[in-house]
Amino acid sequence: MIDVDALLNCFGVASCAVNQLTSGLIIGMLLFLVASGLTLIFGVLNVINFAHGTFYMLGAYFAFSTYLLTESYLLSALIGALGAGFFGILFERFLISKVYGQDILMQLLVCYAFILITDDLVKIIWGSEYLSMGVPDEFRLPPFRVFGGFVPPLYAFLIILSLVIGVITIFLISKTRFGSIVRAAAENAKMVSALGIRVPLYFALLFGLGCALAGIAGALGAPVRSLTPGMGFGILIESFIVTVIGGMGSIPGALIAALILGITRSIGSVGFPLFVDGMMFVIMALVLIFKPTGLFVKGSSK
Amino acid sequence: MNFIKFHKKDIYISIISLLILISIALFIEHPWPRDFLVSIFSFGLLAMSLNMLIGFAGMVSFGHAAFFALGAYAFGLLLQNENFVMYFGQFSIPIAFVLSVLITGLYSAIIGIICVRLNDIYFAFLTLAFQMFLYSVIVSWVSLTGGDQGLMGGIPRPPFLGIDLSDSIHRYIFCSIIFVLCIFILRILNKSNFGYTLRLIRDNSERAEFIGIRVLRVKLICFVIASMMASVGGIIMALFTSGAYPEWAFWTQSGEAIFMIMLGGVSIFIGPLVGTILLRSINDIVQIYSSHSDLVIGIIIMIVVLGLRKGLVEYFLEKISFKKK
């Protein structure tokens, strides 16, 4: 099942190894952004946003349209993030917050219905064909040479930017006033609202932030991936696997787990192309069996 | 016999419904009612078995359709294998049937061992993840499963014991017997000690643990039985369409099954079946009038979930009981 020769051949040659590692990092970092949004929402609201992939899709499509109009990649990434965040807040306020604390069945159904509706709307607005944004003009530059391998500037930019966004998010949650209010509300929402803080507003903002993270991942990834209605679901499953491996609620855990998965994917595409998905599930199953709380979280998932 | 005495009412109901179902085939020549009913048998078993997890045991699975699809694919692949049909001759169909159910049981036991230990949200998501794993295997293993085209070339249906499943009347009667039998088994389980144990675990698993019930083992057994039941639904669908399709393993199928349960309500034993009939009918009607059926179904789900906040059946039952007061 595993093609050892292909693996050895690739990693014997520095250029191939560099290429595989860069593509692994790209997959991992984009996955990290989506998963950090998921894990953030779960950590505070104790809700798994089954519709999280939808915001990734919305981000990508908003970015696509903005790019067609303005031809600016950075602006389209911004619009993708803001648009997804905005719809995230609407989704939280008008739909999912109505079933907080209720049977998980209700939450599942609200998310299921939301995915059906948005996927169909995207189909109506943008069509059901695969769309491709192409590499933006800003990044049509000669690639860097690293150990004989080629790293396109866009890739390097994506990796660094995702890392920066991740650091900013952690800073926002752990060091700012917004972050401390949200964390306090997660512990005891009634107490916080008794202090005169509008807790639902902060919950909505946090939900929007999580969705914006998914949206910016979709927007940033638009030039390297193709867009299709329903594209969000695959990434939802992958980011769930990331949160299981890294531990629910832990952003640093999500980063490491996302990188593990990204690199597994890119190495797998050389060494065991038919078993790439299987490998991710094997890793997840092993973590669940031996450390069900995830690798980087103390406490219990039971 | 005690068993017969205890289940007298259920046995009568099963026999009468079976007679009604069979008479439909004998008196109505048009194939439409038969086709509609076979799809109800199949998806009804999916919903009823899922309700064994959700309604009886409180385990909200979002990946139940995986076992439905696995049953269908196992059944189709076994019968498409020439050696298998040569070896078992006229008993191919019953043996393939039993084997597919067992294969699904084995697979669900492996998934179950990992999943049943986890709490609600994790359980829902994990079952979903494993379903998508199966989906990706089906779609990418083209040489075996036909990929996204589905299992093509038809499933051979060699006659056995005078039953010829390629004949639509025979097939319909065969499926109704299997269906009624399965619902009867679910009913027995529901009324048995096992069923009460499941409800105890649903309502208070700590207390169940304290009185000496091995909660995880009971949950696992429930998970495996429900999965095997779902695979029977899949086999009926494979028989009916003479094929198997990856959509059956797609997550929307599980979402649909959950909505069927919600529509019919979890508090009534036969509720999920009513939900299946409702949703299938809604689906058929929507598909006639709109090419965007997902959009319409999505809006309907939102209205039911956020507007009524309970199943349609429960909603109307409550309305009626209020009027009486």
Image (cartoon, helix red, strand yellow):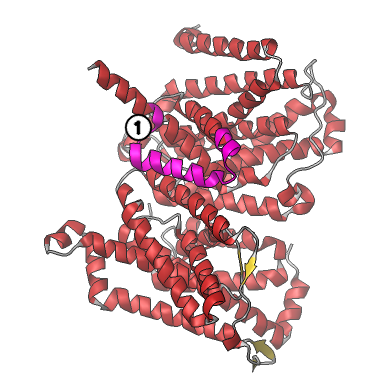
Q: Magenta stretch: residue A250 in it?
A: no
Q: Name above or below for residue A31 compared with residue A91.
A: below
Q: Position of residue B155 (x, y in %)?
A: 79, 34
Residue occupying image coordinates x 43% and y 72%: A81
Q: Chain of mark 1?
A: B
Residue occupying image coordinates x 39% and y 41%: B303
Mark 1 neighbour density, 10 Å: few (under 14) some (14–19) many (20 or more): many
Compared across the picture, whether A75 is left or right of B318 comes to right
Q: Quadrant of residue B42?
A: top right
Q: Position of residue B163 (x, y in %)?
A: 77, 18
Q: Is residue A254 visible?
A: no
Q: Position of residue B123 (x, y in %)?
A: 45, 48
Compared across the picture, whether B302 is left or right of A98 comes to right
Q: Position of residue A150 (x, y in %)?
A: 67, 88
Q: Residue tagged by mark 1?
A: B200
Q: Name above or below for residue A224 compared with residue B249.
A: below
Of residues B214 and A100, the one drawn nearer to the viewer in this rendering: A100
* Amino acid type, mark 1: Leu
Instruction: Please identify the dominant SS of the magenta region.
Output: helix
The region drawn magenta spans: B284-313
